[in-house]
Amino acid sequence: MFARRLRVVSTVLATVDALLAVAAFAAAYEVRGSLLPGLAPTFPALPEGPLFPFSMYLPLLAGIVVIWLGTGFLLGVYRPRELRERGQAVLDPTRQMVVAMLVLAAALFFVKGFYVSRLLLLFFVVFDWTLQVAARLAYIEWGPRLRERLGDSYRILMVGTGARAQELAGMIRESRQAGLRLVGWVPVPGARTESRGGEVQDARAKNGAGEFDGLPVHALGDVPRLLREQVIDEVLFAVGRDELERLEDLFLRCEEEGVRTRVALQMFPHQASQVFVEHLGAVPLLTFSTTPEDELRLFAKRLLDTVGALLLLVVLSPLLLLLALLVKLTSPGPVLYRQTRCGLGGRRFALVKFRSMVADAEQRQAELAALNEADGPVFKMRRDPRVTSAGRWMRRLSLDELPQLWNILTGDMSFVGPRPPLPQEVEKYERWQRRRLRMRPGLTCLWALEGRSALSFARWMELDMAYIDNWSLWLDLKILLKTIPRVLLGRGAA
C-alpha cells in the first residue's frame, strides 16, 4: 500500500482503539457495578459493594486512553503498515495490553489510586482486548469484501511492462485488501519486456491487443480514450529513461485532466503539478498531482460528510416526509427523481432529488433545446415549462436537493465540491475541464456564492478549478456558512 494511505490507516486504527477503550471501560463499569452485586446472594465470593459514581473514574479513563495509545505507538502497533495476518491481529493487542497494564499498575501505585476496583480493571482488560482483536479480524476478513461490494477500488493503469513494472504490479496485487487494483498494461513501442520467468518478449507485439500477466494490454495511443471512457484514478509509469522522454505528451495529458501520475524513476519531464515522493513497498515513486493530496485531511472531510449527512437525515426527516407528500399530491409521477451523474474520477452514480418537473421532463428537453439560456455543454432555462408549481418553490429554496444527503452518506457526494455533471456534458468537456472530476462532487461550492444558476459555464469551471487548487477544510466551512443565507433568500436559483 502507498505510504500516505498507510499513515491514514494507522491514524484510523489508533482512533478506533481509543474509542474501543472507552466502550470497554463503560461496559466493565456496568458489569462490575450493576450485574455482579445482584449475583452476590448466589455466589458469596463475588464482591457486594457498589462502585463510586462513573464521573469519579473519568480521570482514570483519560489516563488509560493516553497510556494505551502511547504504549501502542512505542511498540510500533500504529506504525504505517498493512494489516494482513490474523496472528498479527492477535499479537499486537496482546503485547500492547500487557505493557499498558504494567504501566497503569505502576501509575496507580504512585498516585495511590487504591480506590480503583481490581475486578473493574480485569473486566476492562478482557473487554478491550476482545474488542481490539475482533475489530482487526473483522477488517482483515470483511474489509476487502466490503470494498468490492461498494466499488471502492483505486484503479491504476501501468505504463511499461518491464521487470520494475511487474514488481510494482505484484505489490499492487498484494495491496488489493486496501482497495488498490491494477486495470491494465500499456507497453511502450520499441521497449522490450521480460516476463517473470525470464522469457524476453517484444512489447511491440503486445501494443494494443491481448493480455499480459492476466490483464488487458492497451496501445499507447488509446490512453486518452481510456481516460475518457473508463474510471482510471492513476497512471503509473515504470519505464526506462529513454522511453520516459517520449511519454512527455502523455504526462501533460494526465496533468491537464487532473489524473494523478507516478514515476518509478528519478528523472521526469517538466510539470506544473505538485510533486512528491511516495513509496509502494520499498520502491520510491515520484508523484504528480494537480488535486489535493493530504489523505488525512480528505479522510476528515469524508468523516464530517458522513456524520453531518446522517444527523441531518434524522433531524430533517419530518420535513422530508412533508415534501414527499407535497410532490405526490401536486403532480402525477414518482416522488424521487434519479439521474445518472459523474462523480469522483468519472464514476457513475444515481443522484437523488425530489421531482420538481413533470414526469416526462427528459423526453421533452429536445423540444426546448433552442431555448437553452446557458452556454457550454449544459441546459438551463429560467422559466422552464416542465417545472411544476411545487417544484418551482422547492427549487428556489433548494429543497428539492435535500435527498442528496443520501448521496453524501453513501460517499458519492460531499457537502462541498464541484457539482456532479451529466455524462453527456462530460463528453463535451475540454481536457482541462475534466480535472474537476478529480474532486468528489458536492451540494455547494464557490459557484453558489457568486451566482448559482446565473453563472456562465466558463466562469463556473474557473471557480471549480479555484476551489480544487485552494481546497482546505477551512474553505469548506466558509463556503457552507456563506451558502446557507443565499439558499434561504433564494438568490441565484433558477
Image (spheres, rainbow, N blue to C red):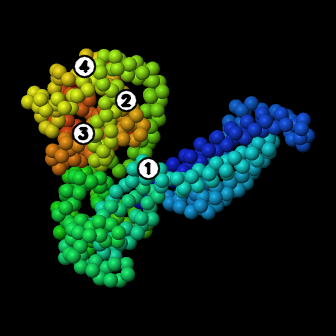
The quadrant where residue 378 appears = top left
Q: Is residue 452 above or below residue 184?
A: above
| Mark 1 vs 4: CB contact within 8 A | no
The quadrant where residue 479 appears = top left
Q: CA distance from mark 3 to mark 2?
A: 17 Å
Q: Is residue 486 above or below residue 111?
A: above
Find residue 149 and name its label. 1
Of circles 3 and 1, which is in front? Answer: 1
Say which label, 1 or 4, has the lower sequence index: 1
Q: CA distance from mark 3 to mark 1?
A: 24 Å
Residue type marked 1: Arg
Note whether residue 126 is visible.
yes
Q: CA distance from mark 2 to mark 1?
A: 23 Å
| Mark 3 vs 1: CB contact within 8 A | no
Q: Would you say 241 lies left or right of 457 here? A: right
Find residue 421 and name its label. 3
Residue type marked 2: Pro
**What is the number of callouts on the image?**
4
Measuring from the top left, give residue 268's x and y in whole percent. Answer: 24, 65
How packed mark 4 is, by other alpha carbons closer than 10 Å (few <14, some 14-19, many 20 or more), is some
Residue type marked 3: Pro
User: Which residue appears farthest toward the left when viewing the image?
Assistant: 370
The quarter of the rendered structure image containing the C terminus is top left
Q: Nearer the viewer, residue 4 or 379?
A: 379
Say which label, 2 or 1, has the lower sequence index: 1
Q: Residue at x 79, y 41 (%)?
A: 117
Secondary-structure class at tag 2: loop
Find residue 403 and name its label. 2
User: Which residue appears farthest toward the bottom when viewing the image?
Assistant: 199
Residue type marked 4: Thr
Secondary-structure class at tag 1: helix
| Mark 3 vs 2: CB contact within 8 A | no
